[in-house]
Amino acid sequence: MNGSSSNQHGVGLQVRGLRKSFDGQEVLQGLDFEVQPGEIFVIMGPSGSGKTVLLKHLIGLEAPDAGEILLEGKPIQSPEVLSRYRMAMVFQSGALLNSLTVGENVGLYLTEHRLQPPAEIARIVSEKLEVVGLKGAEERMPSDLSGGMKKRVAIARALVIEPQLILYDEPTSELDPLSAVVIAEEILHLKERIHVTSLVVSHDRDLAFGVADRIAVINQGRILTIGAPDEVKRNPNPLVQQFLNASFKRH
Amino acid sequence: MFENIGEMVLLFWRTLVALPLAWRQRQKVLDQFFEIGNASLLMVCILSFFIGGVIALQTGPLLVERGLGSYVGGVVGFSIAKELAPVLMSILIAGRIGSAITAEIGSMRVYQEIDALRTMNINPIHYLVLPRMAAIAVALPMLVTVAILVGWFGGAVVCAANDRIAVSSESFFSALRSAVALKDVANGVFKSFMFALIIGVVSCHQGLVTRGGPRGIGRSVTKAVVNSIVLIVIFDYFLTRVLMR
């Protein structure tokens, strides 16, 4: 998933006819979409629509029953792609290693692959933590952090890889509105700064319409619509409108 | 069940293949080694002292009554070195350390930490399994060696202190030396090495296949301890048969 190239531009992702079933239940029913290099592409959908299963396919934790996922036109799990392009994922929970400090978590990729000497790793860790607004948090333990801080540490850990594609799994879930704004700004900031391709899976409408270049709405493993935020808002499909306009009304 | 056995054999093989990387992971191996030692040494000493004492108490009066007092040291020394220390200490470590390994890896699995490792191209077998297997494979034989010595000491103390036995420490150890060869101790230590591999593989495997939340972790821990103990006892029989030749 990670190579030694230092290209600082996003890569294009193509998903073609992706199908996956668990115990006879089809979770992904032939997904087709393309993410352009440097684009922020948001996949929205209600819980259980197949968003997380899709992400697991992208990072190689699940194998599809049919279809393919291509990065720059080549199968995403091929050795050539894994050695040439760098991809990182920010998990819904942050997925920080609880037994390591924040600094050790952020520098884990560099330490384990012995890509830099310890002093240089410390400098890079400090730099990445500063980027996400957590300067000086190296010695803190993940258990001491709030949900928002954990996600920012997870983003810093992803940045250390210098990714060309970042996958975000529900980046604003369980966060207060202020922390959610910080994360959304971070996603936009990374696109501007390093032109990384971002694929965000979320059911947060504010985040999606705030950061996306394009949005796909999926339901029950099928894509209902893909387009720019305004196009998606105008889509007449009742399921799309129901999802986008759902609100609580007090009687 | 057969699927589990197959997965465990595969995990063991992959760990063996990764063994040359153990030097790179030496800090983690050392951390695990000291954790096992810290958590278990005192308990091992207390347990083996009293096991030695109980064996002396059970066998001593019977042998003394039949005029075989000079054999007490041999009986206690032999049974502790070849059977009781390796099996009981391995069961203790399966409960104390195996359960901790499963709980830690299981919670990492449930909370996506292992998925995060994979996305960073860090092999969980190299990062998690290898250091724990290497540490337990070194630590358990060392703990069993200590247990054998402390067990003998416990037996000697009880033999000297109990009026119904009244065998001096000198006679006890003299009998022990004539009955127990270095090979017998080595057999016991070798057994414990094999049991350490069983505990390591079973515990790591159960951790890696953990599903669900806290209840899933609890289930995996229970399975790891029970399966380790069952396998230790079964393998003990076959190892004893092989080592008797």
Image (cartoon, coloured by chain):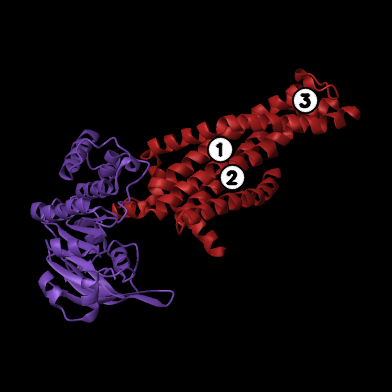
Chain colours: A purple, B red
Crowdedness of circle 2 by 10 Å Cα count: few (<14), some, many (20+)? many
> Residue B195 — which label?
2
Q: Secondary structure at mark 1?
A: helix
The numbered mark, 2 or 1, whose residue comes first in the sequence reads 1
B166 on left or right of A184:
right
Compared with B156, B234 (above or below) is below
Query: Is residue B193 visible to the viewer in this orientation of the structure?
Result: no
Q: Amino acid at mark 2?
A: Phe
Query: Is residue A120 visible to the viewer in this orientation of the structure?
Result: yes
Chain for disc number 1: B
Which residue bears the numbered disc 1?
B140
Crowdedness of circle 3 by 10 Å Cα count: few (<14), some, many (20+)? many
The Cα atoms of the two marked residues, 2 and 1, are separated by 8 Å
Percent coordinates x, y for residue B201 in the rendering: 51, 50
Q: Amino acid at mark 1?
A: Leu
Q: Secondary structure at mark 3?
A: helix
- The residue lying toward the viewer, choosing from B24 and B245, is B24
Q: Nearer the viewer, mark 2 or mark 3?
A: 2
Crowdedness of circle 1 by 10 Å Cα count: few (<14), some, many (20+)? many
Task: Say whether marks 2 and 1 touch (CB < 8 Å).
Answer: yes
Percent coordinates x, y for residue A47 in the rendering: 32, 68
Is there one chain holding both mark 2 and mark 1?
yes
Quadrant placement of the N terminus of chain B? bottom right
